[in-house]
Image: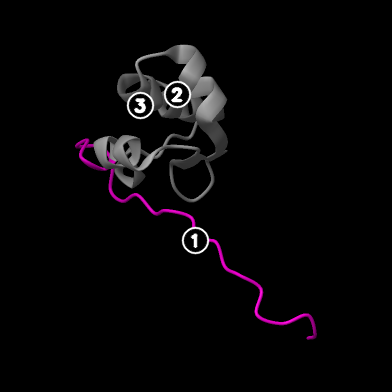
Amino acid sequence: MGRRKHNDVELATSAHHQLLTSVLKSQEAARDSIIYSYKHGFSGFAAKLTKSQAQKIAELPDVLHVVPNHFYKLHTTRS
């Protein structure tokens, strides 16, 4: 979503919700899935999605990149 950087914070958040709603087919599901909207420096968001939902978003023309979270296992109890 980097090409569509919004200077208006509310407009950016609204655009993120609209994008999620287009994939999740529900405004409530979009509101529930979004974790954070990035509005400073670039336009983007973090959301809880399935792999297939993330793939659908990645295929949209306004989306530049989708990055999945990585969970790491603790290897030691000492630092």
In the rendered image of this protein, does residue 10 appear above or below residue 76?
above
Q: Which labelled disc corresponds to residue 36?
A: none
6 inside magenta stretch = no
**SS at mark 1?**
loop
Check whether the beta carbons of the residues at disc 3 and disc 2 lie within 8 A of each other: yes
- Disc 1 designates what residue? 70
Q: Say which label, 1 or 2, has the lower sequence index.
A: 2
Amino acid type for the residue under numbered disc 1 = His
Residue 72 image offset from top left, x and y in percent: 57, 68
Q: Which residue, given by chain and number where applicable, does mark 3 sit on?
A: 19
Q: Which residue is mark 2?
A: 17
Q: How is the image coloured?
A: one colour
Nearer to the camera, 14 or 23: 23
The quarter in which the C terminus is drawn is bottom right
Residue 77 placement (x, y as % from top left) = 78, 80
Magenta stretch, residue numbers: 58-79
Q: Is 47 drawn above or below residue 64 in the view shown?
A: above
Q: Residue at x 47, y 22 (%)?
A: 30
What's the distance in space between the residues labelled 3 and 2, CA to CA? 5 Å
User: Which is the main secondary structure of the residues drawn in magenta?
Assistant: loop
